[in-house]
Amino acid sequence: MTQLDEIQKRLLREVADLHEVPEGAYNIRSNSQSAGRRSTANIEITSKTDVSGLEIRIRAGTKHESVHIPVVMTESGLKETVYNDFYIGEEADVVIVAGCGIDNCGNQDSQHDGIHRFFVGKNAHIRYVEKHYGSGDGKGKRILNPVTEVYQEEGSSVEMEMVQIKGVDDTNRTTLAELGKSAKLVVRERLMTHGEQNAISTYDVRMNGEGSSADVVSRSVARDHSYQKFDAKLLGNAACNGHTECDSIIMDEGRILAVPGLEANDIDAALVHEAAIGKIAGDQIIKLMTLGLTEQEAEEQIVNGFLK
């Protein structure tokens, strides 16, 4: 693997919890170049030939294996679009860890747009973790625009953990999903914005198969003058169960917009949406201050606990 500098290593720790070369299959991308790759007997990673990106093929029946595909960027002004396709074989059960970290100390914007498509075979299960992180003291922005497409066959299940806690100036996250018979999708989004940051999350989940289900939950905190929009649409095209929830804390001069969307196209489609936006309760802060914390420390404790 190509030798990484200390900033790149720090970014890898933040977005993929990597302190060393991971076990199993991996592809590490640094400043638009491959910094290292390894396939295994059951997980094959190859480069696309028509566009920048990867094809990851996971054999049917693969169990208890993982694949890491993190991206780090440390060059100011660098902008890229990457297309990654995942083909998960029937009965497989794997963990996929992605994520992008940008450290921008220059005056030009740095941007990574990642388009990930998942083709999940019959009765397969994947856990997908995607973390975004930004750092650097430059005036250039750190911009991330991920697109995630999920196509689930009968009996498959997908768990998605989407995390963005610090340093990303602008993000527009789009998630599209189509669920077949008895397929299950669970999404947990955690997001915090501060300063003048903007974050938009859009979900379009189509439950096409009988017995399919989706549970999309977002927890977020908007601080300073930041702005967030959570736009979640569930379509029940068969006998199915769908739930979407937005639970947000607003602080300072932050702004949050929650847009629920439920469309039932079958008499047995059961769809529910919940949304709550509010400030931190004063009695919570007072209780923590009686234990010796300052007001600021109390707020931080509440926010950290809320986003866990």
Image (tube, helix red, strand yellow):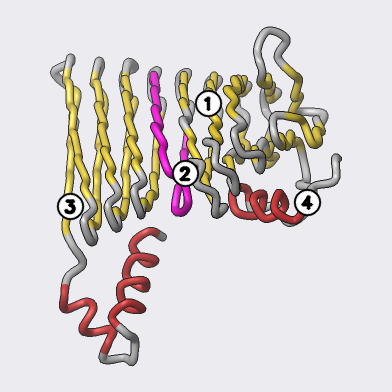
Mark 4 vs mark 2: in front: 4
Residue at the (67%, 55%) spot, across then down = 10
Q: CA distance from mark 2 to mark 1?
A: 20 Å
* Residue placed under numbered mark 4 in the picture: 5
Question: Element at badge 4?
Answer: loop
Image x and y of residue 239, in percent: 24, 21
Which residue is at 46% across, 25% downward?
147
* Kind of residue at badge 1: Asn
Residue that badge 2 annotates: 161
Marks 2 and 3, how far apart in space? 21 Å
Q: Which residue is mark 3?
A: 277
Q: Residue at x 27, y 87 (%)?
A: 289
Marks 3/4 in contact by CB < 8 Å: the verdict is no
In front: label 3 or label 4: 4
Q: Position of residue 155 (x, y in %)?
A: 46, 25
Q: What span is colored magenta in the figure?
A: 158-179
Q: Is residue 134 left or right of residue 271?
A: right
